[in-house]
Image (cartoon, rainbow, N blue to C red):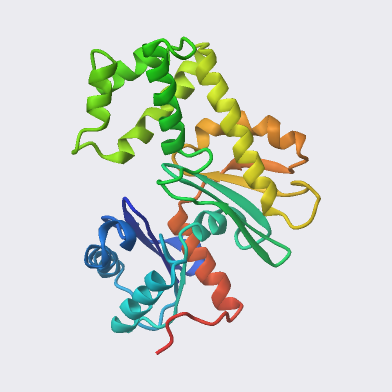
Amino acid sequence: MWGIDGGGSSTRGIAFKPKEEWGPVASAGASNILVVGQKAAFSAVDRVLAELELESNGSGVAGLAGADRPAVFSAWQEFFRQRQLSRVWIVGDYWLPWGAYTGGRDGAVAILGTGSLFFSVWEGRLLRAGGYGWKIGDPGSGLLLGQQALRAAAQSLEGCGAPSALGAAALEFFGARDLPALLNTLYAPDMPWRHVADFAPVVFREAAAGDGASAGLLAAEARSIVRCLQLLQPGDRGLGPLTVGLSGGMAAAWLPYLEPLLAQEGCVSVSIVKELPVQGAARLAALWEQERRPYNCEQ
């Protein structure tokens, strides 16, 4: 069994050997077709496959960003067919943290990174929320929190908003002397849009130091995350007995803010997903092979 985790920043692969022995993690660059294009995405997955040295009759799960879109899904189907890898399940990459957390049982995950997405399997139903993308902004994501924090920083510096430590913190973080210089830096042509998300951890730091504006932003976004999670269980039972795993680069920072809110909702447990998403892919491959689930890439 094997698994691949392909996203907008990196691609990882791993083999799952008998007696639950993990092989080494193979890695390459980004493989989100919608971000880097088909040629670069295919090249990254090819490098991972070469490192894994897979047999053509091995089963695997490829969790790939954007695979929910028909054109992207079809492109990956043809990719694996051309490489004589027919026993493959192609899924969106959000399946992988869920597989790592639940092992294929009922449960939900909140993937909290540069973007965010919420996904559950509950009594046979697949439910998801969020994942709106960078143009709109995802609840609880680093990008949206960074945008909100920089707006609060700009208003504080200009004097049209509440005083906040975020103003000085933004100037220091981006190496700007004043608000016009900060805006020039943010809108420079070579400024990566993801860099706005890098400012999000500063909000947690300033909130812990007593900044009211930062604390307010985090409280509002924590409630938004919980509202998304409330959509991940069928019926009108709230979160009920749902177990929630937090994954992604922002997961640990969000945990203390979400725990009390989720406890109020009757959630059984919330914790950080410990395994890598790529390990979740391999676990799902083993489970789906046992269940004889149809492959996506039959010759």
Q: Is residue 48 left or right of residue 144?
A: left
Task: Name the outermost residue toward the bottom.
Answer: 299
Residue 236, how many percent across, how many down? 80, 51
Where is residue 25, by image quadrant?
bottom left
Residue at 45%, 62% (x, y): give it: 21
Residue at 31%, 35% (x, y): give it: 195
Q: Nearer the viewer, residue 55 or 107?
A: 107
Q: Is residue 280 visible?
A: yes
Residue at 43%, 25% (x, y): give it: 149
Name the quadrant of the C terminus. bottom left
Residue 113, how many percent across, how many down? 44, 42
Q: Is residue 67 above or below residue 219?
A: below
Residue 205, how many percent across, how many down? 45, 19
Q: Is residue 131 above or below residue 171?
A: below
Q: Nearer the viewer, residue 36 or 51?
A: 36
Residue 92, how many percent across, how many down? 47, 63
Residue at 52%, 60% (x, y): give it: 95
Q: Is residue 175 visible?
A: no
